Image (tube, rainbow, N blue to C red):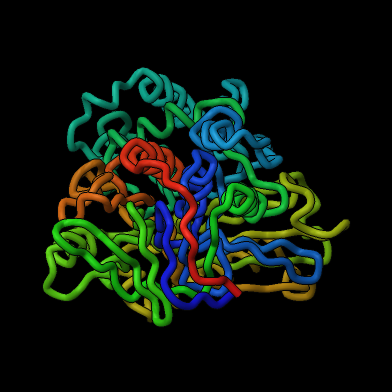
Amino acid sequence: MTTTGTNKSDVVVVGGGVTGLATGALLAKGGKRVTVLEKGNQPGGRAYTREEKGFTLNYGPRAIYRPDTGVFAELFRRLGRPKPTFGYPEAVRSYWADGERWGAVGAKAHQVMTTKLFPLGTRMAFAKTMLALRAEKPERLGDETWGAWVDRHTSDPALRRFLRAFGTVNTYTRPSDTLSARFLVDHIQRNILADNAVGYMEGGWRSMYDAFIDELQRNGGALVTGARVERLEVRDGRAVAAVTHDARYEADAFVCTLPAQDAPSVAEPGSELARELAQWAALEDVRACTVDLGLSRPLRSDDATYVYDVRHDLYYSVHSESAHDLAPAGGWMLHAMAYLSPEEAADDTLAAARKDELVAGLDRWFAGWRDAVVVERTLPNVRVVCARNTPTQYLRNRVPLRSQAAANLYYAGDARDLPGNLTEVCFASALEAADAVTASVRATEPIASASVN
């Protein structure tokens, strides 16, 4: 799609990932004339989904927490649309490996007390620690880290390893020791201990963002791809236009959903906006190495559909066992991930070593995978989330709702200063930004604009 000339809208949204598309859909549903600008040739951002040879591949991580009762459900309720269909993994088919020990922990007391992953003494310590976790008051934890919380509640080495791994797999963060205990305890209590805590979307994440695009366009909004914003023009303390290489998009309000690390690229050098955006560009993000495999057949004879290597922070999940349409009949869609520490993400040699560990795990847990591969995609160093939830970064030094440099510029995305984890922050910030813009931008009559080809 190519757009030329000057275009006028009520609102311009910069970025066509899930946050930008959700924000645009909400605003269009509320009667605003919205233009969403996406630099890539396809929308979706880190949620981009493609099909190949009957397999559905998402770009990187893909879990949605509490899709039936959480902020995701609220978003679709506000849009007046049915939610995409989800499949839910079974806890008894989720296996953990700690050295030579192997077993499913499950979600019920009797399963925990009979797991082969832990010796008897560790099982008893685990039950006691889980009771403490359920009763904990997150707001009282201050700046305590998850590692300190774990060490304070158990001296059992095997349980300490498991709880650290549990923190990593539920936040994608390696190591989890440095995470805010307040953040992680709150997340576990609200999401992981809930029914149907984690869902995998049938049809891939495209089922979600296609719904946003449809809602945007059916209400008169526009999605422009291949439209990299080169600068946001700011005059007298207000944003007036988003400028691409061949067009100018004027609006009464703007919403920036770019990753905090990338957002400074849209500001005029030396401007107040540039100085504002620069303060969040140094946020430490979360990264991972992922391998997606479309396999022609199942590779395990037991019931395990999920394997987590506790000692190496390696994750393997047969997503098509939960969301069956991700693979053709008789096939498997296997997602593998090696979580990267900041040091590993910053060093190509260390990142490559993590990939080698991930592949070695495939050889160990899914023997014969090489002969069964139909589709393979590797992302060696993908950004999962823009801000690591350490005590100094959780709800602090984060991106606010409104810009101080431009009164009509709003921010949304997973670096926002909102509680939550992963996509929860994306959806919550989309809702908040849409509400704020709706309250501040007066509805106007349609304005003729340049044609869109």
Establish if 292 lies above or below 114: below
Of the pair 222 and 281, the residue shown nearer to us: 222
Q: Is residue 173 left or right of residue 309?
A: left
Q: Residue at x 74, y 56 (%)?
A: 326
Residue 123 vs 49, above or below: the answer is above
In the picture, measured across the screen, residue 96 lies left or right of residue 313, that is right
Query: Visible in this render: residue 100?
Result: no
Image coordinates for residue 33, horizontal then vertical, percent = 48, 51
> Which quadrant, please, contains the N terminus?
bottom right
The part of the image, by quadrant, that contains residue 166 is top left
Who is closer to the viewer here, 419 or 380? 419
- Residue at 54% in and 41% down: 29
Does any portion of residue 299 appear in the rendered image?
Answer: yes
The residue lying at 41 percent from left, 19 percent from top is 131
Q: Residue 66: give x, y in percent of width and height.
A: 55, 33
Q: Is residue 125 above or below residue 208?
A: above
| Left or right, residue 233 beside residue 71 | left
Q: Position of residue 14 (x, y in %)?
A: 40, 61
- Residue 443 on image: x %, y %: 42, 42
Above or below — where is 128 with respect to 340?
A: above
Query: Residue 225 versus residue 72: which sits nearer the camera?
Result: 225
